[in-house]
Image (spheres, rainbow, N blue to C red):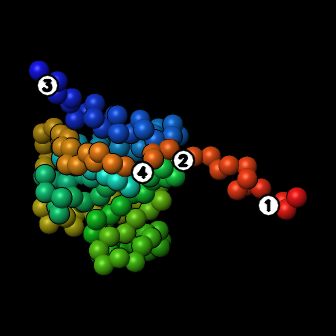
Amino acid sequence: MTVSVSPARQVAGFIARFDPAIARLARAARSHLRRRYFPAAVELVYDSYNSLAIGFGPNERTTDAVVSLAVYPRGMNLYFIYGRTLPDPDGLLLGKGNQGRFLRLESLELLAQPAVVALLREAIRQSDVPMPKSGRGYTVIKVAATKQRPRRVRPRSRLHSSRSGS
């Protein structure tokens, strides 16, 4: 008999592998984005070799996603899939790729800043496929890699962190 684990439990398990501070921020940012901007969106989850990515879009097609949270052992980014086309008068967006741009998400307060709110709203507005206006969003686990880099930062040994030559 195979026991099926719900997507919600799977995502909770993926996030729990990170350091507690990063895991708390990931849970809070995910909840904030879902509640405030993407209540009816499809949440696409990729637990890959390098990171955990949680994207939000109007359907299950990755190419239609609008933003994603990229969680790494040392921090987290808010990634705008088509960020290159977003007006960014405050120069907040980082990256020089052909398509995407990102913000380093060091605290939940960043998501409440007016310039970031404007970026999120504009990214949703520019989406080729509109977000559902009603209904309840759901989660799809797209990738759950079996081989992964460690999700927690390992403390540096004293040998490597010491600069003394004695």
Q: CA distance from mark 2 to mark 1?
A: 21 Å
Task: In the rendered structure, find residue 149 and report the number of the disc placed on it.
Answer: 4
Dividing the image into 4 quarters, which one contains the N terminus? top left
Tell me if residue 152 can be seen: yes
Task: In the rendered structure, find residue 163 and report the number of the disc placed on it.
Answer: 1
Chain-order first, disc 3 or disc 1:
3
Tell me if residue 32 can be seen: no
Chain-order first, disc 3 or disc 4:
3
Q: CA distance from mark 4 to mark 1?
A: 28 Å
Q: Amino acid at mark 2?
A: Val
Q: CA distance from mark 3 to mark 1?
A: 54 Å
Image coordinates for residue 48, horizontal then vertical, percent: 31, 52
Task: In the rendered structure, find residue 2 and report the number of the disc placed on it.
Answer: 3
Residue pointed to by mark 2: 153
80 to the left or right of 26? left
Q: Residues within 10 Å of mark 2 (few under 14, many from 20)?
A: few
Q: Amino acid at mark 1?
A: Arg
Residue in the image at 44% along x and 62% along y: 103
